[in-house]
Image (cartoon, rainbow, N blue to C red):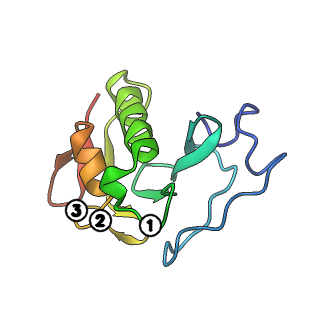
Amino acid sequence: LAAADPANAYGAALPWPDPPTDAGHKPGRKAGSLVVLVEGDLALYMERGGKTLLAWPTDQDTDPADDTRLRAAADALAAAARAGSLGTVTVERINGVQALTSPIGSLLEGAGFIATPRGLRLRA
């Protein structure tokens, strides 16, 4: 869903959640940015161009690889990329960490993203 889409209540009717620690930027209703909502809750925010991703785990104390909500969000993001609506996506940073070393990166790989020297890539 486009971050500026009226169906996205975050940044309009609802405040954005605090960005993950050390993320380096905040989400916003910016042209080209995307959100992935799972059961109405914000799970992923992708900056325009797809290089950076913010992710909100269900529980900060749980291993993100075991987070079913984030797994569903990663699958939805991959499905949108495969459908051609995003073009080629290369995620370089997740929550301020290199995508290849991020614990959330394993969820993207499980959804079909491929590790490259620049980050995690998925082509349409």
Q: Which residue is mark 2?
A: 102
Q: Amino acid at mark 1?
A: Asn
Q: 10 Å neighbourhood of mark 1: few (<14), some, or many (≥20)?
A: many
Q: Tell me the crowding category of disc 3: few under 14, some 14 to 19, or many 20 or more residues within 10 angstroms, Cα based.
A: many
Report helix, strand or loop for mark 1: loop
Disc 3 is placed on an element classified as: loop
89 lies left or right of 35: left
Tag 2–tag 1 contact (CB < 8 Å): yes
Circle 2 Cα neighbour tier, 10 Å, few/some/many (<14 / 14–19 / ≥20): some
At 60% from the left edge and 34% from the top edge, which residue is drawn?
39
Q: Which mark is residue 95?
A: 1
Q: Mark number for residue 100?
A: 3
Residue 84: quadrant of the picture: top left
Name the secondary structure under disc 2. loop
Q: Residue 40 at x, y = what percent?
A: 65, 37
Q: Label 2 to label 1, Cα distance in Å?
A: 8 Å
- Quadrant (top left, top right, bottom left, bottom right) of the C terminus: top left
The x, y position of residue 63, in whole percent, is: 34, 62
Where is residue 123? Give x, y as percent. 26, 34
